[in-house]
Amino acid sequence: MPEPSPAAGATVAQFPRGVAPAVKETPFIRIDGVTKRFGSFTAVSSVSLEIRKGEIFSLLGGSGCGKTTLLRMLAGFEDPTEGRIFIDGQDMTDLPPYERPVNMMFQSYALFPHMTVERNVAYGLKHADMTASQRADRVREMLALVQLSDLGQRKPHQISGGQRQRVALARALAKQPKVLLLDEPLAALDKKLREATQFELMDIQDRTGTTFIVVTHDQEEAMTLSSRLAVMDKGRIMQIGNATEVYEYPNSKFVAGFIGSINFFDATVRDIKGDMARVDVPELGGPVDARAIPGLVPGQPITLAIRPEKLSLSRTRTDAANAFPGTVRELAYFGKDSLYRILMPSGRILSVNSVNARRVGENERVADWEDAVWLSFDPAAAILLKD
Amino acid sequence: MKRRPVFLITMLCFGFAFFYIPILSMIVYSFNGSRLVTVWGGFSTKWYASLFSNRQVLNAAVLSIEIALLSATFATILGTMAGVALARFKRFRGRTLFSGLVTAPLVMPEVITGIASLMLFILMAEYIGWPATRGFTTVTLAHITFCMVFVTTIVHSRLVEADEAIEEAAMDLGSRPWQVMKDITLPVISPAILSGWLLAFTISLDDVVITNFTTGPGTTTLPILIWSKVKLGVTPDINALATITVVIVGLGVFVAGVILNRAEKRRERDMHMAYQANQ
Amino acid sequence: MTRAAFFPRLRHWFNRRGWIKITIATPYVWLALFFLLPFAIVIAMSFATRTPTAPPFSFGGEHPLMNTAHFARLFSDDLYIRAYLNSIGNATVATLLCLLIGYPMALGLTRVSRSWRNVLLMLVILPFWTSFLLRVYAWMGLMGTNSWFNKLLTEAYNFVMPADMALRYIPMMNTGFAVVLVTVYSYLPFMILPLYANLEKLDLSLNEAAMDLGSRPFQVFRDVTLPLSVPGIIAGSLLVFIPASGELIIPSLVGSSSRPMIGRVISDEFASARDWPMASAVAVALLLLLVGPLMAYSYYEGKSHEKPTAGGGN
């Protein structure tokens, strides 16, 4: 995986939670060669992962990718078939869930239906070495943290979904765990509430300093919430990095295709000059200049990938390094941007996303149905992928 | 388009008529003044009077209730344990045999269970001397055995459909498995345990065949008494007894229905409240 | 170990592993003792020899250790063969009738409004909570030769039939018909409830989809509802068929004494003839006849209780 170049470094400020240099120390959680098999099915396949203290780390992947199994092994509900799990230097692998300094927020929230909100939050504290009044204080503090102080006497079925989610959070945080595991924390909420809760979660993590590990299938959620994320597929970790890294510098076709949308092309390396490579792309109808990756040799087959928003459209040819003619086949207007489907002379159709920076009427847009257009992109926009 | 399922509604009406005409007829004839059970001899409550002055019937009823209370309670304890074992302990030695043992009595023809239990009790009396005679003890033991599997079925299916995440959550918060069982699982399934008890109680109260085999002289439960009377033909005081049973059960079901309905209404109100709180 | 240390250690053991062992072992031992052992006794008894002692049987000694004479008698004495045929035939007819009446009722229950549905379900369960014996008894009243019900049926019969075939009453009590009728009446809830539980879970949008694709209501029923309700049909049928085949009360109250039924044969051999080995052999043979249905039932029961296997999923 290429290190972000200095130019790309400028974008680091964009992502929400910069990884402060201070936390770049020994890993707080170490997952070491963990494999989990259910019969003949391998749910998690030799995963090694290091998570730092105070991070919000996301495990991102589609259903069946093994992310939940990995989370359940951290909580102690599943035993790894192979490998070990360390938290804060301590081997957790053989500890039962009730002896781990880890708490979980369940996808279904798993609130105890027969207990009030207060008793739910207090439940974990009965095993803690605390006096009754300390316990009551902690419960009050936790309910205040999630802004539910008035609802302590209600039962779970008497509160709304969003409130239940916050009770589950308060209950899991009440024991001040070293690590909080969140299984699809926002999946059950509607879109508006989800966005608000996302920031609330980040705020609470900031205030408590707890390490969060979030399992999610929602890439936007993972990208907004987490300091780093791991993209998983078929029980393996495909890439670990911050949001920018996995989006702008995917290391594989899977990651590139899983996060955001992208156009892939089969290409062949023609020659390499310094940090630039020229590749032949038959479907585009000519050679493309792209930023090189290490280990390329001329004649090597390779995949070229370009994200739709990095392609620009114009009616006339620009002086960009890479420019190709095409015809507008379809166009969809989304308000803030528009999606074009461009037919290339080779018959290939590709997607172009263009931001509607100005207000324009129907007849004034860059290109219309069946218009001949030029597509261009910067060499830095093109991604070369070996697999 | 919403079509009225005319055929199905007709079948429902027919079915319910089939269910209730015999019962209604029995109730009407319990107020028959005539000794002849099939000839209407004017309205009278004399059969009820004769029923309540019949010590034999009252004693049998009391005995039946005692046995049913005792059997239902033990059956609920044992049945709940079996349900928990099957639903929560995935692997233990002899699990297959165990799950067979809790389903077989459900459908076993009662005659077979009856003679099997009777032979066991006779041989026990013969070789270990306990229970020495057949009667209250043997009937109760037999009732516990065939009632407990009904409790197991109810508890087991409730546990299987319960969200196991709440038990995991309790464990995650530091409770050991036994504590989870005590704090979370048992309270959550308590309605199922209660309905298991009720079912066991009514089954025990109603049983004829197994009681008939396992009981001894002097231990006459109400169904056994009715059975011996009915074998000789239809008598009006049994009509009265049946009417009382139907009324008691009907009232019980009605009260339960009202309570459930109220709980449903409260739940709806709560949901409404939760919805409002969300706005 | 001192006494003082015993109870804390016991509590420790209980909290760790003990409660699990107790939870499994208590019902297990109970059922082994009071359900499995009696069955072992029945099976062993069917090979014993009847003696005029108390208890009236013996193994070995001057008698063969494995006496198979009782099983031979099952095939030679036509009383037993007739009893089996009557019982199985009776149970089969009753099961089919329960299905014919119960299926539309169960389906009808899923089609009425929510509030009605709860009331009607209660009405299905209500007779089940009243005494079984009293339900049989209710029909004895109705089927008697002088009852209003019998008179009504006789009038109707005489109205339809030519005058020379007129009857004074319809003989119903102590007939095979009475046994089937009362069996259907008593076991109908056992058919309706599992069927309802099954049908209620079916997604109504499947029916709408089938209708949308051009099926008429009957075709929808035949192509969608019926195949999907097979598990309910099987469960309900077994719940009726198995107990009905060994039924003792119904035949002895409303049946004909000239039509032997297996439940009565077992009971009579045991109580009147005091022939334990013969009664046991008849019971074992009935069990063998029912092994198929019993296994089918526990298979379907087990399947319906199975949880989708955890793990692997996200």
Image (tube, coloured by chain):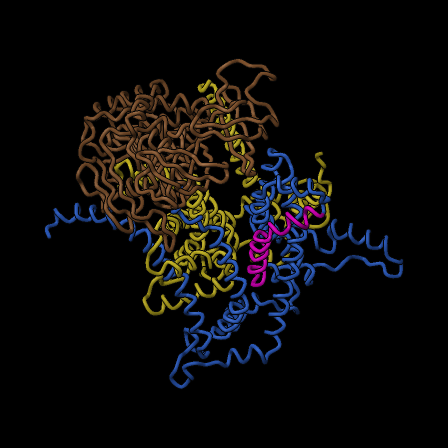
Chain colours: A brown, B yellow, C blue
Taking the image as drawn, is residue A128 in sight?
Answer: yes
Main SS category, magenta section: helix
Q: Locate the C terminus of chain C by quadrant.
A: top left
On the picture, is C133 further left or further right than B37? Answer: left
Measuring 48% from the left and 71% from the top, which residue is drawn there? C280
Question: Based on the displayed image, in which of its 4 quarters is residue A167 positioned?
Answer: top left
Residue B210 in the magenta stretch? The answer is no
Horizontal and vertical percent for residue A91?
A: 19, 43
Magenta part of the protein: which range?
Answer: C219-248
On the picture, is A113 further left or further right than C124? Answer: left
Give whichever of C246, B94 is nearer the camera: B94
Horizontal and vertical percent for residue A252?
A: 37, 40
Look at the picture and state if B78 lies above or below B111.
above
Give whichever of A239, A194 is nearer the camera: A239
Taking the image as drawn, is residue B162 in sight?
Answer: no
Horizontal and vertical percent for residue B25?
A: 68, 45
